[in-house]
């Protein structure tokens, strides 16, 4: 699956990521850290351009192996 570089779209699921980084501590990521291992999975073309949504962060934290397997099955090789 190829998603456009859009700062408001999650690079994994394509949903609105709810990013409020420009608002500083008002963004959900100020209280819900995004694991480095998950950030490393973001396709290179989207790194530092599109935030991961809270749902994908929580899915990754709940079951990293299942998330990686699901994402790997959908991402282009």
Image (spheres, helix red, strand yellow):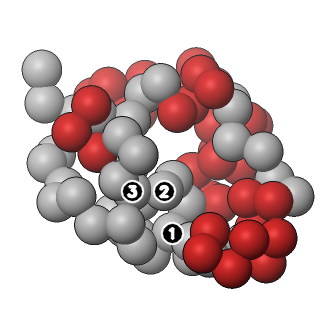
Give how far across and how far down residue 1 sits, in percent: 16, 46
Q: Are marks 1 and 2 in contact (CB under 8 Å)?
A: yes
Q: Residue at x 74, y 71 (%)?
A: 24
Q: Is residue 6 above or below residue 48?
A: below
Point out the tag, 1 or 2, that comes first from the N-terminus.
1
Q: Nearer the viewer, mark 1 or mark 2?
A: 2
In the image: residue 28, left or right of residue 59: right
Q: Residue at x 28, y 66 (%)?
A: 6
In terms of secondary structure, where does tag 1 sit? loop
* Picture quadrant where residue 19 is located: bottom right
Q: Residue at x 62, y 69 (%)?
A: 21
In terms of secondary structure, where does tag 2 sit? loop
In the image: residue 68, left or right of residue 19: left
Q: Are marks 3 and 1 in contact (CB under 8 Å)?
A: yes
Q: For marks 1 and 2, give the CA distance.
A: 6 Å
Q: Which residue is mark 3?
A: 50
Q: For marks 3 and 2, give the CA distance.
A: 4 Å
Q: Is residue 60 above or below residue 23?
A: above
Give how far across and how far down residue 5 sits, in percent: 22, 58
Q: Which residue is mark 2?
A: 51
């Amino acid at each position: 699956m190829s998603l456009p570089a859009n700062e408001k779209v999650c690079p994994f699921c394509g949903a609105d990521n709810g990013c409020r980084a420009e608002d500083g501590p008002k963004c959900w990521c100020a209280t819900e850290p995004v694991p480095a291992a998950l950030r490393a999975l973001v396709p290179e073309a989207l790194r530092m351009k599109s935030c991961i949504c809270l749902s994908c962060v929580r899915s990754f934290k709940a079951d990293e192996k299942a998330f990686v397997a699901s994402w790997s099955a959908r991402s282009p090789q």
